[in-house]
Image (tube, rainbow, N blue to C red):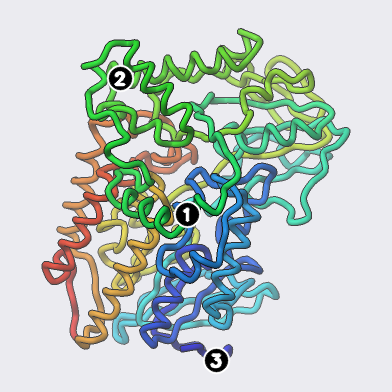
């Protein structure tokens, strides 16, 4: 069902037109529902619309990142590389929007400023603002936040940032026309995933590149390569998707490919041989080397030493290699970065690594960046400073539930959610890959699909039975939050100052936000809730 452009009342309002929003629209329309997708950008794609910086690409393999719901789409689309670059992923999502005729129900250039639950009508009142500044109120029985986990850029807290005389670029909102750094002195602040991807390509253009590093990250190679037709056969895709469903990370790494022995049961030589095998394979599967790798102990320390050895092998200057070696947190506590030629970039004569632990940034000046040691003159500045992850895009909207309670206030001490899908006190509001779900610790495409199917099936169940509202109970929510914390506690994940815990945002509560119990266990928990008649939810008849 395609809705008229001037309509304001809907069955469902979806916020965001990335992977989640597009699939939600497709499934909800197939149920005959009126849907409006509201998107701030002037195109579809979500994070892949905004993040256009040099080297931007996915760290999940392309063959596992495409939607699984359409065999026809599988036959028609061909991925170019093992790890797709941003332009290819954006082209794919535009193809999806066109093939399934989704654009008529997507309202672009429109920001959602507030969403308020109206208790008497059991409907959400959603206020929007378009590019001209004009506001409109939409309403729907259900509101689905498909706003993404890494979509709210973090504002860098650096003195004098606005005083810099040259251009300042943010990896999270890169100019669509691109940037030419030829002949320029460039500074990059930030060495997380975005910085790791952008730095090698910026170094190839710039006259000189200064990389300002506060925290060294653990990095594994992509070993990217072109894909052939054989890689994309239907049988290959089916096997990969089957393997991914059974993998804790939701990637196509079969159980038979992993070492089932504990790291402590092996000799150092045997451990190194396994690490080397996975290093040569490339990608995030290094995290699955041993069942105990993500626990603090001998296996994790062995992984840290192996990765440190690889840095020493790839970086010519021992002093630079030492600065690039992570310290003070275990492997996995911060998200592993997947690189192409990152370490080799520091062997270039036109690249200087600035160690901010030894000499912090004091301020940005009109001429460049002043550290405790010197003022470094620059022509351009690149900020790869990350996101207010998991919750930032939600709390940026004035969301108010029953009794006018603000979501931002409810989450002041950390997010609390039932399954990452629903929040007590906010009936008929769903979140896709919200805090308390595997989300960023999994293949996002797989987790998005699972959530979208769960949400749309739930809406069909409710409407077919004349249910006016569904709301997570406080008891079920608190039980799930406690379970998620219990599962995370023995692991390394809560141990680092990372965006997983909100540590990168000043003033944000420090809570480990994703669910680390694994994709299969999480999926089973969601299925049990449904099998038990939506246990943990209060259903109110119309």
Q: Which mark is residue 345?
A: none
The answer to whether residue 428 is above or below residue 342 is below
Quadrant hosting residue 489 = top left
- 10 Å crowding of disc 2: few (<14), some (14-19), many (20+): many
Disc 3 or disc 1, which is closer to the eye? 1
- 10 Å crowding of disc 3: few (<14), some (14-19), many (20+): few
The answer to whether residue 362 is above or below residue 229 is above
Cα distance between the residues tagged 2 and 1: 30 Å
Residue beneath disc 3: 4
Q: Report whether residue 393 is seen.
A: yes
Identify the image quadrant of the C terminus: bottom left
Residue beneath disc 1: 65
Residue beneath disc 2: 299
Question: Which of the two labelled residues, at mark 2 and mark 1, occupies the earlier sequence position?
Answer: 1
* Lateral position of residue 296 relative to residue 433, left or right: left
Task: Give the residue drawn at x 61%, y 51%.
Answer: 80
């Amino acid at each position: 069902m395609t809705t008229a452009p001037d309509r304001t009342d809907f069955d469902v309002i979806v916020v965001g037109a990335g992977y989640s929003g597009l699939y939600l629209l497709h499934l909800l329309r197939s149920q005959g529902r009126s849907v409006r997708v509201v998107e701030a950008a002037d195109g579809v794609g979500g994070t892949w619309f905004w993040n256009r910086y040099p080297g931007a690409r996915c760290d999940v393999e392309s063959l596992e990142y495409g939607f699984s719901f359409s065999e026809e789409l599988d036959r028609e689309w061909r991925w170019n590389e093992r790890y797709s670059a941003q332009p290819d992923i954006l082209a794919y999502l535009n193809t999806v929007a066109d093939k399934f005729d989704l654009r008529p129900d997507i309202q672009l250039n429109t920001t959602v400023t507030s969403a308020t639950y109206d208790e008497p009508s059991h409907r959400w009142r959603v206020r929007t603002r378009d590019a001209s500044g004009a506001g409109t109120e939409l309403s729907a029985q259900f509101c689905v936040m498909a706003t993404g986990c890494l979509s709210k850029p973090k504002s860098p807290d650096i003195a004098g940032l606005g005083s810099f005389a040259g251009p300042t670029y943010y990896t999270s909102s890169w100019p669509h026309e691109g940037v030419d750094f030829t002949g320029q002195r460039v500074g990059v602040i930030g060495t997380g995933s975005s910085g790791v991807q952008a730095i090698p390509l910026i170094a190839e253009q710039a006259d000189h590149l200064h990389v300002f590093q506060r925290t060294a990250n653990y990095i594994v190679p992509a070993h990217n390569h072109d894909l052939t037709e054989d890689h994309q056969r239907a049988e290959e895709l089916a096997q990969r998707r089957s393997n991914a469903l059974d993998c804790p990370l939701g990637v196509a790494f079969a159980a038979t490919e992993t070492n089932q022995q504990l790291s402590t049961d092996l000799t150092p030589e045997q451990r190194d041989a396994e690490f080397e095998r996975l290093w040569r394979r490339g990608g995030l599967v290094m995290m699955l080397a041993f069942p105990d790798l993500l626990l603090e102990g001998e296996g994790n320390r062995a992984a840290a030493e192996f990765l440190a050895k690889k840095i020493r092998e790839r970086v010519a200057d021992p002093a630079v290699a030492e600065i690039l070696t992570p310290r003070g947190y275990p492997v996995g506590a911060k998200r592993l970065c997947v690189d192409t030629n990152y370490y080799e970039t520091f062997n270039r004569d036109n690249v200087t690594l600035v160690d901010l632990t030894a000499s912090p940034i004091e301020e940005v000046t009109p001429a460049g960046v002043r550290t405790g040691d010197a003022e470094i003159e620059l022509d351009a500045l690149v900020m790869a400073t990350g996101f207010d992850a998991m919750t930032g895009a939600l709390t940026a909207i004035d969301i108010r539930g029953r009794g006018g309670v603000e979501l931002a206030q409810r989450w002041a001490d950390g997010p609390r959610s039932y399954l990452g899908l629903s929040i007590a006190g906010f009936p008929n509001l769903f979140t896709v890959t919200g805090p308390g779900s595997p989300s960023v610790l999994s293949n996002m495409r797989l987790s998005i699909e699972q959530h979208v199917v769960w949400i749309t099936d739930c809406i069909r169940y409710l409407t077919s039975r004349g249910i006016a509202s569904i709301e997570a109970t406080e008891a079920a929510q608190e039980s799930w939050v406690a379970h998620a914390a219990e599962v995370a506690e023995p692991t390394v994940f809560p141990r680092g100052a990372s965006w997983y815990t909100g540590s990168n945002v000043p003033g944000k509560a420090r809570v480990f936000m994703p669910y680390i119990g694994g994709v299969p266990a999480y999926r089973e928990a969601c299925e049990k809730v449904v099998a038990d008649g939506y246990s943990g939810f209060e259903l109110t008849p119309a």
